[in-house]
Image: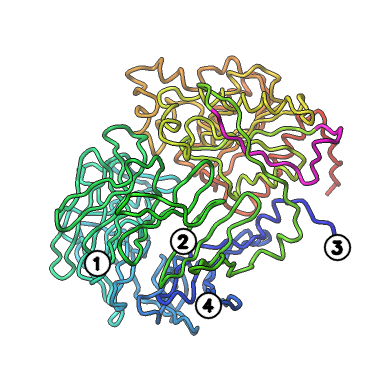
Amino acid sequence: MSKKQNITVEHLWQIARIGSPSLAPDGAQAVAAVTRYSMEKNSSESALWLLSTLGGAPRALTHCGDKDGQPRWSPRGDRIAFTAKREQQGEKDATPQLYLIAPDGGEARRAASVATGVEAFRWCPDGKRLVFVSWVRPELKGHKAQAEAHKAFQERKETGYVTSEAQYRYWDHQIPMDRTAHLHLLDLASGTWRDLFEGTPYELSRAEPDAGCFDLSPDGKRLVFAFDPAPEKRLENCFALAEMELKSGRISVIAQDAAWDLSAPRYSPDGQRIACVAQHRGLKHTMPEQLAVWARDTGGWEVVSAEWDHEVHAPLLWEDDGQALLFTAEQRGRQHLWRFDLPDRRAEVLVPGGWVQAFDKAAGTLVTLADAVDHPPELHVHLPGEPAQRIEHFNDALMATLATGRTEEISVRGALGDDVQVWLTYPPGFDAKAKKKWPLMQVIHGGPHTAFGDAWHFRWNVQAFAAQGYVVAAVNYHGSSSFGYAFKDSITHRWGELELQDVEAATDALLKKPWADKKRVFATGGSYGGYMVAWMNGHVKTGRYAAYVCHAGCFDWTAMFADDAYTWHAKELGAWYWDDMARVHAQSPHAFAAHMKTPTLVVHGALDYRVPDQQGLAYYNTLKARGVDARLLWFPDENHWVLKPRNSRLWYGEFFSWLQRHDPGAPPAAPKRPR
């Protein structure tokens, strides 16, 4: 047997990445998009695959597209709809379009040519129509006028973006200028469609509207959607629910409360109730997302999971009997699939994580997509009374050649005397009893209200870090999700304080281990984790950590007002900077720059609108001005994440070479060959 290899960045990009599954109505087959990357071409291709839930090898369904995605089985099981950009009948798609293909193969057919493109869709229950999302100019009528205006805009010579809106960009893209997201009803037989919101003030969320924003009633007569009732759209506004009668076009607001945000509506099997995710933002912006149900007979809604200290994640899926709902929720650094029983309001784990990424259920057959820290996402089928079974093996041959390090969960006594979870991943071949000393790497997660989970992460892969010889520690510090509301909310208005105590408590505990090398300790983090690394540079004694890596980190909370989420700042920090600059500065790393002396690699992307790249540039410039050893990796074509294969390889290369350069125990780097 050949010796297994340690995981490298090249291996990470050889892994096939599986999308969310959709089940046929009879549950016998699932369809999912599978994306493969080429390091040589620096690109990706996605195709649809059919997977039997009853046994048998997966089969490629599409071959001609390069970005086939979002597959959904028709209600009658005779067709699969998906989005793609293709060339067909001499016409090349400029925007994503809807395509249809029979499950037994053949050529995919474009359902319609929508000039403004298709973002997401749902089937109508009759299988003859689809409702899709497209960004349109609300003042225009008819798709001919929309197409002409869209063509003129695409051909314009000007490049300026002009707006008076409060919300005008999101993560890595501008909100389409002068356009709003509307729902459209497409008749598949004729290929014609109409704008359901035309002539109304309604629109979907401006933050990446998807199929979770709306649903169709089981009888196909009604449609429910979430909308922002405020005149000026803002990221933190509370959404309401409205219902449309498809035949008449009449719209009624069915659930609205200025203090509650309502999202992800889903009809019950009989159409008499609508489940949704509800968050009491009027009480506090950190309040958990809970399960709520609206009833047609009373016209009212109530939160049904109020006594359950977990956060409900969309999408929601009703059981066939209408007595329970399925959804994912986190618990202590893992994400399980849960079943919430409505009569007794009790939640139980249906499929434990790892990290359940997606799921679907039909005809009693359940399919889940889940990963864990030691393996990438995998598809399993769960049949009643039978153990779970894998239904694909796309990555098995590759993973069989790779060595993974052991991961364990420990706890340390952190801030406020609380027990704090720490995930430890050891290098392959690690032996705690050997005399060898090992370096320690802290990997600090972003958010802050997320968690480092038992999950496979392609951009911050702890197995790839451990393969370089580091013991990797990931602390779920105060403020992290999945440990209850009080733990999550504890850092509000005092960012940096409790989180630092938790990270330092973990470092203290690990440095007491006989294998730990006290001179070879590093801290790395991205986004809020990058903020924490910058915070540590101004608050932790110099020499404690040999070097830092700050990826897309927040540095100056005043300048951060350039981000897409600026309306949240006062909620998180406790004040607007013009009202209480001292309070804002007390939580801002830049205010402690005089104490920063630890060498730092700063990484940022120019397309990052959540943490604009001037944050990273200001941090790097500050360190250089102070004479601190620093290095900058700046990407003109990446956003908050590094998504291109070649750029990812550069990222990992700079990451490891920076740590090695500041590692007193690292072997000397091999001399570079002359080119």
- CA separation, marks 3 and 4? 35 Å
Structural crowding at the residue carrying mark 1, measured as other residues with C-alpha within 10 Å and reported as few (<14), some (14–19) or many (≥20)? few
Q: Main secondary structure of the magenta part?
A: loop
Q: Could you say where residue 144 lies in the image, as x and y percent from the top left? A: 25, 70
Looking at the rendered structure, the kind of residue marked 1 is: Asp
Q: Give the camera-side residue of 3 and 432.
A: 432
Q: Is residue 200 above or below residue 29?
A: above
Structural crowding at the residue carrying mark 3, measured as other residues with C-alpha within 10 Å and reported as few (<14), some (14–19) or many (≥20)? few
Looking at the rendered structure, the kind of residue marked 4 is: Leu
Residue labelled with disc 4: 61
Looking at the rendered structure, the kind of residue marked 2 is: Phe
Residue labelled with disc 2: 359
- CA separation, marks 2 and 1? 22 Å
In the image, is residue 639 part of the stretch drawn in magenta?
A: no
Q: Is residue 272 left or right of residue 573?
A: left
Quadrant in the picture for residue 583: top left
| Element assignment for label 4 | loop
Residue labelled with disc 3: 1
Structural crowding at the residue carrying mark 4, measured as other residues with C-alpha within 10 Å and reported as few (<14), some (14–19) or many (≥20)? many
Q: Could you say where residue 591 lies in the image, as x and y percent from the top left? A: 50, 18
Looking at the rendered structure, the kind of residue marked 3 is: Met
Residue labelled with disc 1: 270
Q: Is residue 226 above or below residue 520?
A: below
- Name the residue at 16% across, 57% down: 200
**Looking at the image, do the residues carrying marks 2 and 1 touch, with CB atoms under 8 Å apart?**
no
- Magenta segment: 419-437
